[in-house]
Image (cartoon, grey):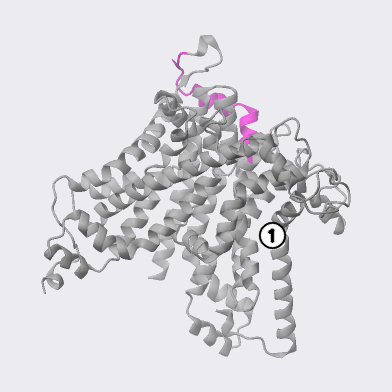
Amino acid sequence: MTTTTQPPGRRRRREPILPYLLILPTFFFVAMFTAWPTILAFYQSFFRQRLNIAKFREPTFIGLGNYTALFSDDRFLLVLKNTLIYVLVTAPVSIILGFLFAMLINRAIRGIGLARLAFFQPTILPMVSAATIWMFFFTPDYGLWNTFLQRFGYSGPQNWTGNPDLALIAIMIVAIWKNAGYYMIFYLAGMQSLPTDVYEAAVLDGANGWQMMWRITLPLLRRTTLFVSTIAFIGAFQMVDHIFVLTKGGPSRASTVLLYYLWQVRFENQDVGRAAALTVILIAFLLLFTVTNFFLSERKEGDYA
Amino acid sequence: MPDAVSPRGFWAKLGYGLVLMLTGLLALLWAAPVIWAFIASTRPASEPLGRGDVWFGSHLTLENYVRAVSLAPFDVYYMNTIIIVTMILGVQLVTITLAGFAFAHYRFMGKKLLLFFILLQLMIPTTALLAPNFGTIRALGLFDTRLAIAIPYFGSAFGTFLMRQAFLEVPRDLVDAGIIDGCNWRQLLWHIYLPPSRSMLVAFGLSSVVWHWNEFLWPLVVTNSDKSRPLTAGLVRFTQLGEIGAQWSLLTAATLLVVAPLFIAFLIFQRQFIQSFVHSGLK
């Protein structure tokens, strides 16, 4: 049969323009709403342009002025610090919880479906709805959060979203609650495709559950972990919806993270140039995390071979 | 996998029991916000929540839902969200199928480069580009329309990639048979490539609907009136209405109104939802 003699390069039907036409719609929208705005942000970041101040309404070239202004601004440095804390805490904690949940519910007993449902359901809630519910949990005085903590002897500040020391933590708690179940399902899918004979052999060798988790499950799920951490880190930079409901970035910017700040600068201060510089910085962070993860995964793949 | 290891001996059984208890406790903790919201939304408005009194009221009532709907145009928000989500999904299904087909079936100059270009969208998510995209929407004269909310998502790198992968799985003999039978490209796509890839399309569709139903920041930026505002942006506006204050029963009722369709669908089709999220790895 001809099919077996053809090289695996397969389906190389030559059509001069049809493939390009088929890709055109996708190409067009990606060009217009991903490539072009990236270039535009880069370009605009070298100009001063503020729409709410008459004499700055027209763009003026100021070189790296927006960047130097940002990096010498304590508010921005605080925002950077908040962002790093937010991302570097919520992503790993959600991933670890996701893994833990998957370990807990990966067993065939009655009622386990309910637990899976409980862990996963925050994923499909809109973040603003979740935040509205959590707003009550964080209410001082009769909110459930403090009531719950007091059971364990907590007697600290009551107003979580209004306290500069606690606002960012409150934001992180909601983000972790929302995401852990999402990462759980990837681990669950991964665990269910693991070979059972490895575990049977480990049991015969007298390994306990703890050893099996560290020596077998985690190493075998390395690819899952890399995938999950990529989406978790990228997702954390973008997860700001609940800030609009819970803290509005306050008090005194204690819970302002990069994307929220970008929104404020662009739509409250009407500062196009500064917002463009912030966009470029955000893109740089996202690329940094994606590329790092990519190279980590390449290296780890190499280990296996 | 741990099924292979059923607990033996007293300590193992005790440990197993503790693990199950921990699972139950954590699950209850995780579900608490939604369960509480549901309970609070059924409380009569005349009985505000207070210290130690945050549970069911004296009787169950739907009055909060009725009042929420009368205070804000949730019917319009619903329409808007449904139209936006349908518009995005409708266009995406076409664009990703065509592009995925081109990348899987044909060989052409610049194929790798084009694929890389489209996959840029995965690395630079649209959300991060809201400032420059806002300018584009303004320039196009689309500000405060439903189309403005939908249009940046008409091309989907992830969808394209998923469909390409699904189409590459289609057995080659099947495709060759189609070609020998004289199928044109539309027939090949429709009768040979699409049928076995339908589950991938459904998976992508479900997660696309959930993601765009829930989206908030971009709609907030490109709308400023109720005629185009979706449920999420409408809800946030509602929570900030002066007369609402701390009327938790009312707030939770409004919140659940926004969540209800997806949540009910999710309860019914739990397995498909979870599958689709695993498949597509995008929210």
- Camera-side residue: A11 or A96? A11
According to the image, label 1 marks what residue?
A: B30
**With B6 as the anchor, is A16 left or right in this view?**
left
Give the amino acid type for the residue marked by disc 1 in the picture.
Trp
- Camera-side residue: A34 or B252? B252
Q: Is residue B261 above or below residue A242?
A: below
> Quick one: label 1, few (<14), some, or many (20+) residues within 10 Å?
many
Q: Which residues are magenta?
A: A58-82
Q: Residue at x 81, y 41 (%)?
A: A159
Residue A63 on the magenta segment: yes
Residue B125 on the magenta segment: no
Which image quadrant for residue B224?
A: top right
Which image quadrant for residue B5?
A: bottom right
| Quarter of the figure that contains the C terminus of chain A | bottom left
Q: Position of residue B257 (x, y in %)?
A: 64, 47
**With A89 as the anchor, is A299 left or right in this view?**
left
Task: Characterize the magenta stretch by its predominant secondary structure.
Answer: helix
